[in-house]
Image (spheres, grey):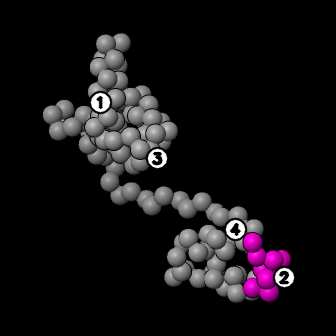
Amino acid sequence: VPSRFGIWAKTPAIHRCVAMENILKKIRRRGKLLLKIEEEPQPPPPTTVTTGRCFLCGRARNKTPRKMCAKCNHWVCKNHQKVFVTVVLIKNLLPSITITILFCIILVFDILFLLLL
């Protein structure tokens, strides 16, 4: 644990490092943490494409929705929006889940969703 005097003596150098854009984000983030500076959230890059293929439909249905998931930037059609929200929540809660298990869960939710219609 660095002493307060050490941080006080290095404060100008840390400010310079935090202001540099060509330094690793990890180092800048650590410098902001030491200086107790709040990090501004970066806006997502603007997308030039307005439609895309639904992540869950595949090429057979060939749906091109205009809505995109804010967390993972996958295109999602109206039929799969509720299913996809559940899948994203499961994926965030269990990061070690494999893709095959995830698609099995998607398939089960898709079947349940179609049965409820």
Q: CA distance from mark 1 to mark 4?
A: 41 Å
Q: CA distance from mark 3 to mark 1?
A: 21 Å
Q: Residue under circle 2?
A: 5
Q: Main secondary structure of the magenta part?
A: helix
Say which quadrant the C terminus sits in.
top left
Res 58 label: none
Kindly identify the amino acid type of the residue bearing the numbered disc 1. Cys
Q: Residue under circle 4?
A: 33
Disc on the earlier residue, 3 or 1: 3
Circle 4 SS class: helix
Circle 1 SS class: helix
Return the x and y of residue 13 as percentages of the image width and height. 70, 87
Magenta-colored span: 1-10
Q: Is 115 on the left-hand or right-hand side of 87?
A: left
Total numbered circles: 4
Q: Is 12 on the left-hand or right-hand side of 44?
A: right
Judge by depth and name the residue closer to the eye, 42 or 99: 99
Q: Residue under circle 3?
A: 71
Disc on the earlier residue, 3 or 4: 4
3 vs 2, front mark = 2
Say which quadrant the N terminus sits in.
bottom right
Q: Residue under circle 1?
A: 104
